[in-house]
């Protein structure tokens, strides 16, 4: 009986979302186990079966850090972005394209789905350029070079549309290239934000290891369940965000500015996507334009 009630509540949302693009970003910290990843994959498949067009973008930060440490390299982040030298870039490609992307595709196959794994390079989906961080130091501007870290120059979503039109679920790793063929490591939240923007997706959904945006990062009960973009911008300026939440907030604000209807930051666990999308209260943070 309870399940019937849930289904009745979900029906208007299913009708509203039918035929629309949704970009779902699975963070490395959201892939705590194969069981959790599989439950997320099953939920994405359910979206697909009710006529939504999901695009999966994945991260894999913790696994990259683990491999780097095995090779004797100490991971270093600036503003939530990994400083990426040549050796690190090789590890990034190995882990993101070689391991995690392939693992997610296999998980879809195991559950009866047709997924295609691609990276930002494929079909020139993401054309990247080198990212430099600019910081004010008194009157001077300091420029920080992160190595092979990229930012998006432009997005060409044709490859995604071709795959989706033929019934495939694209699974995208955030490794991209410039037109000279140089490879760059881009933060997966930013890639998801750009893809959602280029597709004018109905939603950008970011799965991570906290329930959503917290007023106090140390207190999981301080969840903000609904917030307007302009208030999120104020929070960003107040310095309440750090580490991996910074690129998420940047991606969310960018997506909403570019016509994405809603963005959600939620915990990656069984049915969290469904509870967020198909119930009135949701379970994480919904950001509105
Ligand atoms: N205000 C905040 N609300 C929620 N999380 C925050 C906040 N500020 C910083 N964080 C941190 O951001 C982390 C999520 O980013 P990250 O570790 O990069 O995850 P992922 O691998 O899923 O991309 C959380 O675990 C939390 O420690
Ligand atoms: C430039 C940069 O920081 N790239 C990220 C790419 C992977 C990622 O974004 O993974 P999560 O989503 O798990 O954080 C990195 O090297 O960790």
Image (tube, helix red, strand yellow):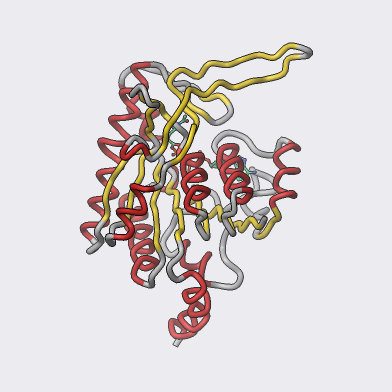
Q: Which of the two residues, 49 or 244, is positioned nearer the viewer here?
A: 49
Q: Position of residue 23 (x, y in %)?
A: 45, 53
Q: Relative to residue 229, is residue 250 drawn left or right?
A: left
Residue at point 37%, 61% (across, down)? 44
Q: Quadrant of the C terminus?
A: bottom right
Q: Which of the two residues, 199 or 231, is positioned nearer the viewer here?
A: 199
Residue at point 38%, 70% (across, down)? 51
Residue at point 41%, 47% (across, down)? 157
Q: Position of residue 14 (x, y in %)?
A: 47, 74
- Which residue is at the far right? 139
Ligand number 1: quarter of image = top right
Residue at point 75%, 43% (across, down)? 234
Q: Position of residue 83 (x, y in %)?
A: 47, 21
- Which residue is at the far top? 140
Position of residue 196 relative to residue 13, above or below, is above
Q: Quadrant of the N terminus?
A: bottom left
């Amino acid at each position: 009986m309870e399940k019937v009630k849930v289904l009745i509540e979900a029906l208007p949302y299913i009708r509203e979302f039918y035929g629309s693009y949704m970009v779902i970003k699975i963070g490395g910290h959201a892939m705590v186990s194969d069981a959790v990843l599989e439950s997320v994959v099953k939920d994405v498949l359910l979206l697909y079966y009710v006529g939504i067009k999901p695009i999966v973008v994945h991260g894999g930060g913790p696994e990259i850090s683990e491999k780097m440490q095995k090779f004797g390299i100490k991971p270093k982040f600036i503003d939530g972005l990994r400083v990426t030298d040549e050796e690190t870039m090789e590890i990034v490609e190995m882990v993101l394209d070689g391991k995690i992307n392939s693992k997610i595709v296999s998980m879809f196959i195991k559950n009866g789905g047709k997924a295609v794994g691609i990276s930002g390079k494929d079909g020139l989906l993401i054309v990247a350029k080198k990212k430099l961080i600019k910081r004010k130091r008194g009157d001077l501007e300091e420029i920080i070079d992160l190595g092979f870290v990229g930012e998006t120059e432009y997005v060409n979503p044709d490859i995604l549309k071709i795959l989706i039109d033929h019934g495939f679920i694209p699974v995208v790793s955030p490794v991209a290239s410039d037109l000279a063929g140089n490879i760059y490591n881009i933060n997966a939240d930013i890639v998801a934000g750009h893809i959602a923007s280029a597709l004018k997706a109905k939603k950008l959904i970011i799965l991570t290891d906290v329930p959503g945006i917290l007023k106090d990062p140390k207190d999981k009960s301080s969840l903000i369940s609904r917030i307007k973009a302009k208030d999120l911008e104020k929070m960003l300026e107040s310095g309440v965000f750090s580490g991996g939440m910074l690129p998420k907030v940047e991606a969310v604000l960018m997506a909403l500015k570019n016509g994405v209807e809603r963005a959600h930051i939620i915990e990656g666990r069984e049915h969290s996507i469904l509870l967020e999308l198909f119930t009135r209260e949701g379970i994480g943070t919904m950001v509105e334009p």
